[in-house]
Image (cartoon, grey):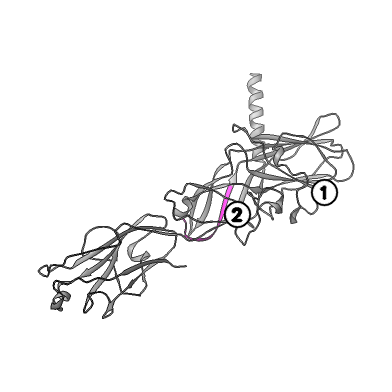
Amino acid sequence: MRRAFVFISVFLSMLLRYACAVPLETGSNSGFKIYQPDDRPSLGVQVTDKKTNEDPDYPYWGGICGVPTTSLCWPDTVPSPKYILRNDTRKIVLDLRSGSGEGVATINYDGENKSFTFNTLDRLERTRYYRLQLKGEFAVSVNTCDARNINFNAPKLSSESAATKVISFRASPVKNDSGLCWLILTSTPTESERSVAMSLGALNFRIAMGIYDILPSGKHLFSLTIPDYISIREYNSNDSITNVLPTIGPMNVKGYVDLKASLNFNLLTTENQKMEFDTKNSAVEFFRILGNFRTNFLAISTTVKCQYIYQGKCALFDGNSYLPLSIGVRSDHLVRNTSTVTLKPGVRAPLTGPLGFKIGTSAPIQYMFGLSREDVLRNPASSGREFSGDVTMVIEGDF
């Protein structure tokens, strides 16, 4: 019975400690830019870095917070409350327990939460950089965190001006998901004020490019919760625990992601189309140009440019006379003699509303160039002759 009682007491104590945890907030003054490479049919997950993802509005990669340039800094990160240490404290032990780093970020767009993969973990290393703000004289005696990526004199951010020293660190590379490391700092007991505080300073991360399937181009505010927790204990000269500070965590991250516009069109039909027209056929005959496209524009439009124009219509020409073409577009590849949107040469026409295209969807599109029996019969000299003309189809996103 006693063993059971002890187990329950420890379990409840752990729940209480996490229930009283103090979350860290980064603030939202940071962000990055991503773009969809149009020549890649499968987008997968992209590693972000300063070279390809810097947003001019947020040039906060690397050096500003004393970490590698592959990491994005939060210059206005909000430290935890400042904890005043006891006068008899001789050392403090800081434990960092890291989650896996596999996470999901959310963006509220048009009243709906959109989610996408946001991983802050390479295969073998935690890629969250934490900052320890110290006031007083301290020396690091033990470090089991990543020795290659610890900065004992990290540059101070605006919110850290009162600190004597700032240490930037992250968990060690590991081959499992324990994610545990610790720092032991020693200090001489004194009646002068000594304090500690924590903040999340930077992230090295990957983002799923599927974000292009759920959000339009533009700048969006994202949020992410990282289940990392930090505990700090105080020890006196007898090496006895004298105080346990409130657990710090989880980490609430906010920032902006700027999605560059993307419009990818694939032509499925050969560029050269040929048709033999039978004047006995009463139906309209069509040249059908098929394609697929994907976009993250909220609105798209199309324009048709023609080599020859006759009576306000695109036309074919044989060197002497013209045959006008009626032009339409529809959102499928079916063989039907009707179009959804009628086009005029050089006149921009909206496609998003009439054709119902959606963000991120691989959508079919069909341009139809029709030749009618009546137009052919109005020009008896056209019989047996070959007419031709070049047509350019333009699809544009509306900014």
Q: Which mark is residue 51?
A: 2
Q: Is residue 222 magenta?
A: yes
In the image, is residue 280 part of the stretch drawn in magenta? Answer: no
**Does residue 137 appear in this view?**
yes
Question: Seen in the image, is 250 located left or right of residue 326?
Answer: right
**In the rendered image, which residue does mark 1 sit on?**
164
Closest to the observer, 242 or 62: 62
Tell me the tag on residue 79. none
Q: Quadrant of residue 29?
A: bottom right
Rendered position, 308 above or below 15: below
Kindly state the secondary structure of the residue where label 2 is placed.
Answer: helix
Q: Residue furthest front?
A: 319
Residue 156, image x, y percentages = 76, 52
The furthest residue to the left: 280
Which residue extends farthest right? Answer: 191
Q: Nearer the viewer, residue 128 or 27?
A: 128
Where is residue 173, by image quadrant? top right
Residue shown at 85%/35% (left/top)? 90
Horizontal placement of 204 versus 303: left or right? right
Instruction: Please report the bounds of the magenta region as a residue range.
Output: 214-224
The vertical placement of 305 against 196, above or below, is below
Tell which circle, 2 or 1, labels the residue nearer the N-terminal end. 2
Instruction: Residue type at mark 2: give it.
Output: Lys
Residue 266 lies, in percent from the top left, at 36, 57
Q: How many marks?
A: 2
Classified by dominant secondary structure, the portion drawn in magenta counts as strand
Q: Nearer the viewer, mark 2 or mark 1?
A: 2
Q: Quadrant of the N terminus?
A: top right
The kind of residue tagged 1 is Thr
